Image: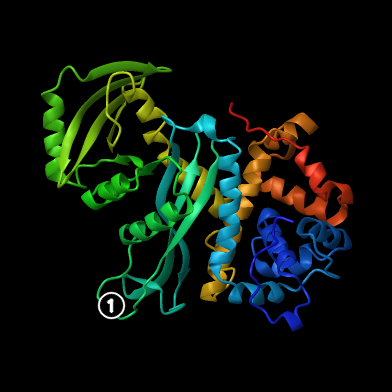
Amino acid sequence: MWLRGLGDPRDPNRIVYPAPFLITTGILMFLTKLGARRQMKFALDTAAMLRNANGLAGTQAERVEHPDTLEYLMRRMAPEELSRLRLAMARRLVRMKGLDRFRLFGRFLVVIDGTGHLVFTERHCEHCLTQRQGDRTIYYHMVLEAKLVTEAGLVISLATEFIENADPDADRQDCELGAFYRLAERLKAAFPQMRMCLLLDSLYMAEPVIRTCRENRWAYITTFKEGSMPERFTEAMALIELSPENRRVLRRDETRQEYSWVNGLEVGGETTNVLDCVETRPDGDATRFVWATSFELERDNVARIANKGGRLRWKIENEGFNEQKNSGYQLEHAYSENETAAKNYYVLLQIAHLIEQLVRMGSLLVRELGRGVRALFGGVRKLGEYLRESLRVCVIPAEAFALDTARRIQIRFDTS
């Protein structure tokens, strides 16, 4: 089955619950929006759930485990093992070409951004980041994510770099920008041939980041703010003023978009191109966006780079982090205070979120039931609750788990 091949660090002579079974129930904890590990013993311990979990995992466990049994495995399994599972799922989607329609100039859009994960009032582990708030110190953990995003709202976790202090006595703490270079190595190793365009915020407007993208043959679109590189920003705006031929005005619905640009801005030993867009809404309110990009800018591509590229960076916040924090996944909940287990739960959450998106954004529900998630259940959180009750009381037919049956099912993404 799909979970075979994962390493199991436990003593093989004392294993009662196979690792695929425990990992399946862990994923179900997130898919069914339980919100806490202890809820597993109340919500998942039914005869129907046992048969369904065994069917999904391809195992023959005799009962649903106590949450501490899952915790025991999560504390001992290397996070890289579960990351291999996530990677295999992402590669499968890419190789099936189901995401090709969402490319920008032939490149997949990958957002890299950081978010808060866990916060404690006392030191959690030796790798905690620290911050002073008034007269107290908080201890926290952050993650840096690389997520493939699409205009339709699909957000797929490709790789994670945990931002943490390797040396608790060091003068400087680990940071998001420092983690970027480690994540870039991980991303290149995982997808060496994949054509990517990184979507980045203004923190990454720096010569080393531009060089990293060039060396990896990645395109990029980076938010460019005056505070990022004041001298280069002023120079870019001056060069744009001296290039009146680089102007284009378009309308997007009822919004007026005025584009101006310049190519070949020097940033240290690298060069970049700068795109300025001023949007004016019907009520007269105007908003300005400025991006630096590796794409050569011209009249025929500036609107696409802005609207189908740079503007999609927010997908990682809205459809990614915010959904994982506020729609039942409880990203900021400490599913474990053990450092290794917490990382494993984080990866399980990413896997569960991908599975839910495939259900929610695929054609299966509409084809079989005539309506989508919102019309059927009222929203994403309700989908998890209905799934929980279905698995608790309804036994999935054994033939549904057969590989031959699965191969006959084709799910297409809704691109509306």
Give the farthest residue toward the front. Answer: 193
- Residue 252 is left or right of residue 374, and the answer is left
Q: Is mark 1 on a helix, strand or loop?
A: loop
| Residue 144 screen position, x and y as percent | 42, 57
Q: Nearer the viewer, residue 219 or 303?
A: 219
Q: Which of 167 and 317 is in front in this view?
A: 167
Q: Quadrant of residue 370 in the image? A: top right
Residue 397 shows in this picture: no
Q: Quadrant of residue 170 in the image? A: bottom left
| Residue 406 screen position, x and y as percent | 77, 43
Residue 159's place in the image compared with 19, above or below, is: above
What type is the residue that disc 1 sits on? Ala
> Residue drawn 15% across and 34% down?
236
| Residue 65 screen position, x and y as percent | 77, 72
> Residue drawn 42% across and 69% down?
140
Q: Mark 1 points at which residue?
A: 170
Name the quarter where the C terminus is drawn. Answer: top right
> Residue drawn 71% across and 75% down?
69
Task: Categorize mark 1 by other alpha carbons within 10 Å: few (<14), some (14-19), many (20+).
Answer: few
- For the image, the number of numbered tags is 1
Q: Quadrant of residue 366 in the image? A: top right
Residue 116 shows in this picture: yes
- Residue 369 is left or right of residue 414, and the answer is right
Q: Nearer the viewer, residue 201 or 157?
A: 157
> Residue drawn 72% across and 63% down?
25
